[in-house]
Image: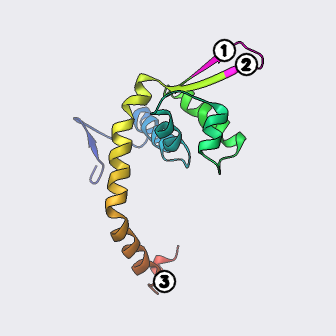
């Protein structure tokens, strides 16, 4: 297939379980909150309430869903300490910590290219070509 990226010696088949799995992982990491939660947890474990304070605009429900998704994917561990009330801490797993370097690299790339991206967006938004309106 032309134009399909190669991973190692294999080509991606969009219908393959491997390609669909990679797509699900990238969807998780591309959502609005997951990378931010991973970045905050890089500094060490946090309680739910601490995460909520550090990410002010996130709702309690969305933070819960994000943490559950990250836990399900093996990126975050949830530890419950049986106190009254129960104490719940979240921390990155070794796999979650391994995500820090690529996430930081992507963030650095975005910062370095913000001016060019803004320029391209302004140019695109100023176009009157009907083909750009989908």
Q: Is residue 78 left or right of residue 12?
A: right
Q: Which tag, 1 or 3, sits closer to the chain's start? A: 1
Query: Which residue position holds label 2?
Result: 86
Q: Which residues are magenta?
A: 78-87
Mark 3 or 2: in front is 2
Distance (Cα) linking label 1 and label 3: 59 Å
Neighbor class of circle 3 (other Cα within 10 Å; few <14, some 14-19, many 20+) is: few
Vertical position of residue 127 compared to residue 58: above or below: below
Neighbor class of circle 1 (other Cα within 10 Å; few <14, some 14-19, many 20+) is: few
Query: Which residue sits furthest bottom?
Result: 128
Q: Which tag, 1 or 2, sits closer to the chain's start? A: 1
Q: Which tag, 3 or 2, sits closer to the chain's start? A: 2
Asked if disc 1 and disc 2 are in contact, CB closer than 8 Å, the reply is yes
Q: Residue at x 46, y 77 (%)?
A: 132
Neighbor class of circle 2 (other Cα within 10 Å; few <14, some 14-19, many 20+) is: few
* Secondary-structure class at tag 2: loop
Q: How is the image coloured?
A: rainbow
Query: Which residue position holds label 3?
Result: 130
Q: Is residue 106 left or right of residue 6?
A: right
């Amino acid at each position: 297939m032309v134009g399909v990226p190669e991973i190692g010696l294999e080509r991606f088949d969009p219908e393959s379980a491997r390609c669909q799995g990679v797509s699900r992982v990238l969807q998780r990491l591309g959502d609005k909150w997951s990378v931010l939660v991973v970045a905050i947890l890089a500094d060490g474990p946090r309680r739910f309430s601490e995460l909520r304070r550090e990410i002010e605009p996130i709702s309690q429900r969305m933070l819960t869903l994000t943490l559950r998704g990250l836990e399900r994917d093996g990126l975050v561990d949830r530890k419950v300490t049986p106190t009254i009330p129960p104490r719940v801490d979240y921390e990155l797993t070794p796999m979650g910590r391994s995500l820090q370097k690529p996430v930081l690299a992507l963030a650095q790339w975005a910062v370095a290219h913000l001016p060019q991206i803004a320029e391209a967006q302004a140019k695109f938004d100023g176009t009157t070509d009907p083909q750009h309106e989908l």
